[in-house]
């Protein structure tokens, strides 16, 4: 009490002009710091992130790029400051991490900040997908989805491009993070290939990063990985179990038979380590040299007729396994296999 019958106003209400009530009080909307890059003196709205950081930006930029803000600003009546005919700087608290807001503002003010098929850190992808989905910035969302679809393609012949699109520091967790993003922001098209790429991690790596997934997807990954390994050996590399493949009756050239026998041995050895990596490594038939003239056969070569039958058999097996990837991981999203 300062005087009889009077009450001291709370600090947040001090010197506040008489104006139309807001849904949130100024105290609740106060920012604790200003972003160093996105604080424009002519900005007419301050966005406040989860940590209290303020971003003074332009309503026009937000409305031009995001349906959410366009609808919100069209419905809201501008509040005019006392004794002024100009709209005041409005304040809006949004429930998003400040780092996400920064990535989003970078894109809104410099659209080339994100480009499809360019090496992009995972935190930037996650932030832009979150913000573009939440605030209906559809061009950006579509671009981020295309970028993810270029990494997690539906044709196994293109999986070799994965290292060129994912930063080294992101590679171990990238596929699991992609599964998480796909579930959270409805991007089912990348799920089958993302699950496959996640299955390439060894058990030690999986034990460290499996927490990224929800329990159901973690179970899908582990069970699908085991099923995939079985199918690789039984279907994709079915020729290793064929007596005809190493029989002298299939080819009377000793060099050709010897080379194919060595291929069986090396493939079985590979099956004991990481057979699920078959789609990101050269196929066994592609590892040998082909000779069209039996008279000129050298060690390590296979005759053309034998190699052709081998390639046809193996390609059919690879296609069958790849087409069944969604079923291994209990996914509904189909894959469209593309022959290499």
Image (spheres, rainbow, N blue to C red):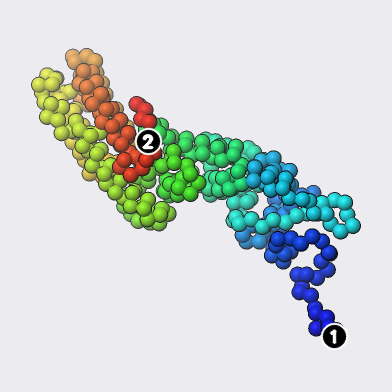
The residue pinned by badge 2 equals 334
Percent across and percent down for residue 91 are 72, 56
Q: Which residue sits at x=12%, y=19%?
A: 252
- In the image, is residue 169 above or below residue 159? below
Percent across and percent down for residue 196 are 36, 42
- Quarter of the figure with the C terminus: top left
- Residue 312 sits in quarter: top left
Q: Which residue sits at x=66%, y=57%?
A: 93
Percent across and percent down for residue 187 are 47, 42
- In the image, is residue 69 above or below residue 34? above
Is residue 45 rendered to the left or right of residue 180? right
Q: Is disc 2 surrounded by few (<14), some (14 to 19) or many (20+) residues within 10 Å?
A: some
Q: Is disc 1 surrounded by few (<14), some (14 to 19) or many (20+) residues within 10 Å?
A: few
Using the numbered discs, state the Cα–Cα distance from disc 2 to disc 1 in whole angstroms.
Answer: 77 Å
The residue pinned by badge 1 equals 4
Query: Considering only order in the chain, which callout, 1 or 2, is on the residue closer to the N terminus?
Result: 1
Q: Which residue sits at x=28%, y=27%?
A: 315
- Given residues 131 and 87, the one toward you in this image is 87
């Amino acid at each position: 009490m300062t005087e009889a019958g009077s009450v001291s106003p709370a600090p947040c209400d001090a010197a506040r002009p008489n104006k139309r009530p807001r849904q949130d009080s100024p105290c609740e909307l106060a920012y604790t710091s200003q972003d160093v890059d996105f604080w424009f003196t002519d900005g007419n709205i301050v966005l406040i992130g989860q940590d209290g950081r303020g971003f003074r930006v332009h309503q026009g930029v937000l409305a031009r790029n995001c349906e959410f803000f366009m609808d919100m600003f069209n419905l809201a009546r501008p509040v005019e400051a006392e004794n002024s005919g100009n709209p005041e700087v409005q304040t809006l608290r949004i429930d998003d991490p400040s780092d996400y807001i920064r990535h989003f503002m970078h894109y809104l003010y410099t659209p080339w900040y994100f480009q499809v098929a360019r090496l992009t850190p995972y935190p930037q992808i996650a932030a832009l997908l979150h913000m573009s989905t939440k605030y209906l910035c559809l061009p950006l969302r579509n671009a981020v989805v295309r970028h993810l679809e270029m990494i997690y393609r539906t044709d196994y012949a293109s999986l070799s491009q994965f290292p060129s699109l994912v930063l080294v520091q992101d590679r171990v967790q990238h596929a699991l993070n992609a599964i998480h993003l796909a579930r959270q922001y409805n991007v089912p098209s990348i799920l089958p290939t993302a699950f496959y790429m996640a299955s390439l991690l060894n058990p030690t790596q999986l034990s460290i990063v499996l927490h990224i997934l929800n329990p159901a997807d973690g179970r899908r990954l582990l069970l699908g990985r085991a099923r995939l390994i079985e199918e690789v050996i039984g279907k994709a590399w079915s020729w290793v179990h064929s007596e005809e493949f190493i029989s002298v009756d299939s080819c009377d050239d000793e060099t050709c038979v010897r080379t194919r026998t060595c291929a069986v041995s090396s493939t079985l050895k590979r099956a004991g380590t990481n057979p699920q990596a078959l789609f990101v490594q050269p196929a066994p038939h592609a590892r040998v040299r082909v000779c069209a003239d039996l008279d000129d056969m050298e060690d390590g070569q296979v005759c053309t007729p034998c190699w052709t039958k081998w390639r046809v058999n193996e390609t059919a097996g690879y296609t069958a396994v790849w087409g069944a990837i969604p079923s291994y991981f209990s996914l509904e999203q189909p894959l469209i296999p593309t022959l290499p």
